[in-house]
């Protein structure tokens, strides 16, 4: 994270503008006292604040900060499901129905709530945030619904094409085996 901040400051400092001069000044100050340059997550910041508060009230080791992301996400998903009847959420309902159909088609299960929980958990991870920032910088993070649907259709077409190619390859392989006067039982681990 520090490298990204320094890199951006350096980029701005090369500009001949007020922003460039301010970035250059900040960059020089950071580099002169680099050991004091500290970046942390918001969670870490709140833990430090909580620890400081606990020390001030004399509760050195008797507190425990616990964030139950799972229950928060479950509540958010439940709230989302409860709001699907509203007119402004009809696109969301359509998307969820498509997700459920896809899940049945590709995974053979209809537990859309678990799928949403897994997806939401991924979004909360710092690794996802870093990848999202990199994709945004590279212009590869899509937020336009039409573009996303277009990409999804392309992926579906590729999957269907691949599946039919695999079926053809299997048919050809079975035909070759049959033409050679063999059966699947002639091969090891055949059932």
Image (cartoon, grey):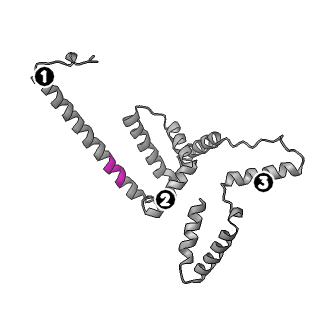
Between 3 and 22, the one nearer to me in the picture? 3
Q: CA distance from mark 3 to mark 2?
A: 30 Å
Tell me if label 1 and label 3 are in contact, CB under 8 Å: no
Image vertical order of residue 13 relative to residue 169, above or below:
below
Image vertical order of residue 167 relative to residue 32, above or below:
above
Residue 178's mark? 1
Between 146 and 47, the one nearer to me in the picture? 47
Q: CA distance from mark 1 to mark 3?
A: 73 Å
Between 86 and 71, the one nearer to me in the picture? 71
The earlier-in-sequence mark between 1 and 2 is 2
Q: Residue at x 59, y 79 (%)?
A: 19
Q: What secondary structure is the stretch in magenta mostly built from? A: helix
Mark 1, secondary structure of its residue: helix
- Name the side, left or right, on which 45 lies relative to 186: right
- What residue did someone put label 3 on? 49
Classify the position of the C terminus by image quarter.
Answer: top left
Report if residue 153 lies within the magenta region.
yes
Mark 3, secondary structure of its residue: helix
Find the residue positioned furthest to the front: 32
Task: Measuring from the top left, give residue 62's x and y in whole percent.
Answer: 84, 40
Find the residue positioned furthest to the right: 58
Give the magenta range.
150-155
Q: Residue at x 77, y 41 (%)?
A: 64
Task: Measuring from the top left, give residue 11's x and y in whole percent.
Answer: 53, 73
Q: Toward which corner of the image does residue 60 lie, by quadrant?
A: top right
Classify the position of the N terminus by image quarter.
Answer: bottom right
Tell me if label 1 and label 2 are in contact, CB under 8 Å: no
Residue 134's mark? 2
Q: Residues within 10 Å of mark 3 (few under 14, many from 20)?
A: few
Image vertical order of residue 114 relative to residue 50, above or below:
above
């Amino acid at each position: 994270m520090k490298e990204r901040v320094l890199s951006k400051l350096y980029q701005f400092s090369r500009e001949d503008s007020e922003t460039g001069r301010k970035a250059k000044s900040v960059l020089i100050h950071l580099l002169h006292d680099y050991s004091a340059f500290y970046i942390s997550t918001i969670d870490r910041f709140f833990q430090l604040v909580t620890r400081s508060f606990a020390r001030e009230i004399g509760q050195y080791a008797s507190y425990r900060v616990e964030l139950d992301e799972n229950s928060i996400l479950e509540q958010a998903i439940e709230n989302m499901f409860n709001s699907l009847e509203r007119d402004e959420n009809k696109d969301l309902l359509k998307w969820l129905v498509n997700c459920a159909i896809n899940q049945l088609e590709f995974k053979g299960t209809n537990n859309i709530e678990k799928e949403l929980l897994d997806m939401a958990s991924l979004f909360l991870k710092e690794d996802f945030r870093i990848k999202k920032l990199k994709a945004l910088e590279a212009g590869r993070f899509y937020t336009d619904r039409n573009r996303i649907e277009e990409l999804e259709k392309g992926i579906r077409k590729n999957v269907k094409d691949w599946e039919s190619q695999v079926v053809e390859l299997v048919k050809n392989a079975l035909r070759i085996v049959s033409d050679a006067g063999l059966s699947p039982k002639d091969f090891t681990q055949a059932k």
